[in-house]
Image: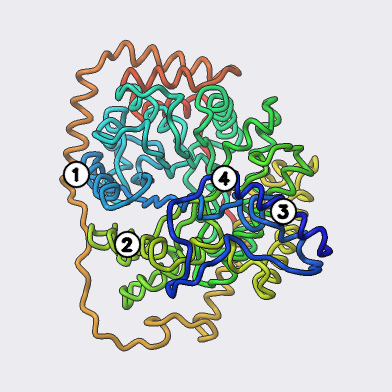
Amino acid sequence: MNAEEIEAGRARWQARFDRSAKRDAEFRTLSGLEVDPVYGPTGDDPRFERIGWPGEYPFTRGLHATGYRGKTWTIRQFAGFGNARQTNERYKMILGAGGGGLSVAFDMPTLMGRDSDDPRSLGEVGHCGVAIDSAMDMDLLFDGIPLGDITTSMTISGPAVPIFCMYVVAAERQGVPAGRLNGTLQTDIFKEYIAQKEWLFAPEPHLRLIGDLMEFCAAEIPAYKPLSVSGYHIREAGSTAAQELAFTLADGFGYVELGLSRGLDVDVFAPGLSFFFDAHIDFFEEIAKFRAARRIWARWMRDVYGAKTDKAQWLRFHTQTAGVSLTAQQPYNNVVRTAIEALAAVLGGTNSLHTNALDEVLALPTEKAAEIALRTQQVIMEETEVVNVADPLGGSWYVEALTDRLEREAEEIFAKIRDMGSDGTMTSGILRGIEDGWFMSEIAEAAFDYQRKLEKGVKRIVGVNCHTASAEEPLEILRVSHEVEREQNRVLAERRARRDQAAVDGALAAMVQVARGEGNLIPVMLDAVRAEATLGEICDALRGVWGVYTEPARF
């Protein structure tokens, strides 16, 4: 790009910047030097067509002309344990300490669409997240938290749609119309087959539910994001950064194809798609990954899927620091790792962020550890001055080379996925890759390669295979009492005894009838939730129609 074109772009950026709202803050270095909102080349730069200015296609440098001068990222700490009332107390602590939004962690029975009193739930209730059995639990979860004012993310995929319905009903009971709700539902079922393994049905029925949800939200809750396409679990399973980038965006393209197959307007539904990435310990590689993700997504949305508006081309993403990078040995080192990973997410332009607690490798975080994790974000936001300049590493020879390299590797993976399919679509290739175990084998190979380097000492982890001497004492960790499970089951039995069973049966029968046809399941599922049908009852009714999915054995 020649100097004249670059200056024309700078003028466009300046006009957008001048029209945009800015935070009331001083944008200077610690020593008092005033800094510009963005920096760029002053002469010819052949790379700049791929880099661009913030707020302008291809959005490599961010979605907004102002960067974080307009709005800083949302501090959204992931939390959930025990029962709904215990988690509600933690949420109020997070919000009271400066958190900007909520992110719900569910326990394993809930993630698998089972009630707490299901025999398969024994010993798991409340242990890796909060137990949610019915809309009344959702009422307690958000008691005293106005759902019309707080954005809420929910990390759940298999039974995401009935959980969403419980959230909507909880808002109704607070007097908040569904149209006012704002937040994100994970819903990403592709990544379950690829990495996390928490599904209920075969892929096609799940895609039916996701399509129904996309239609419902586009029509009824325009600010709500019904899909958060997740690379986090793919990376945590052992993938490389390029695999996380490519598999995640490929899944996103599959959901775009799903929306288009439903006859939805891409410029209407695409802004409802968001993403969820891992921020790992390789500082510059992670920054490059986030920048490449925005550029790839914008190009594909415009050139492949026909999106015309900026918002439909934007890749909005949440980031969580890498749980897999935390170590049980010398756990206070995890505070340092988390801070570095969080800074990489911020320099990569994340829209919201969760920082892991130092003790999460051992158990659910204690309140003290959760506060340190929250304060880590606040120190970055309030003290480091990294929020003053948009994409401050843009133009770095190293960062730009890494960004280009990750983009090329991702494009090579996209081509492989499409070639696996029968019709050239990303969806067909993803489904074939799931069926053949291709994704799983690619991740397993990457994880094996890293483990081999770790054992040989090529890769070093402080406190694990180097610098192992320590003066630390054992941590006190949070333990969830088995009394939580007994009490949850007692309350659940009382609710079942008090409800109108005929209303529940009728609502579930109506839902089954729609599931056997082609209608949208969301309205009838909402009716079942309003009648206090439980999560397990709703999911079991659908299992009766669609069956269950068992992954083929592979050797």
Q: Which residue is mark 1?
A: 484
Mark 2 or mark 4: name the one nearer the start of the chain: 4
From the image, state whether disc 1 or disc 4 is nearer to you: 4
Does residue 490 appear to the left or right of 190 in the view shown?
left
Q: Which residue is mark 4?
A: 20
Q: Amino acid at mark 2?
A: Arg
Q: In the structure shown, which secondary structural element does the residue marked by tag 1 occupy?
A: helix
From the image, state whether disc 2 or disc 4 is nearer to you: 4
Q: Which residue is mark 3?
A: 11
Q: Which residue is mark 2?
A: 375
Q: Nearer the viewer, residue 199 or 215?
A: 215
Q: Amino acid at mark 4?
A: Ser
Quarter location, residue 104: top left
Can you give x and y, in whole percent of width and height, for residue 14 in the image?
Answer: 66, 52
Task: Determine the CA span between mark 1 and mark 2.
Answer: 29 Å
From the image, state whether disc 3 or disc 2 is nearer to you: 3
* Residues marked 3 and 4 touching at CB (< 8 Å): no
User: How busy is the neighbourhood of tag 4: few (under 14 within 10 Å), some, or many (20 plus)?
Assistant: few
* Residues marked 2 and 4 touching at CB (< 8 Å): no
Q: Amino acid at mark 1?
A: Val
Mark 3 or mark 2: name the one nearer the start of the chain: 3
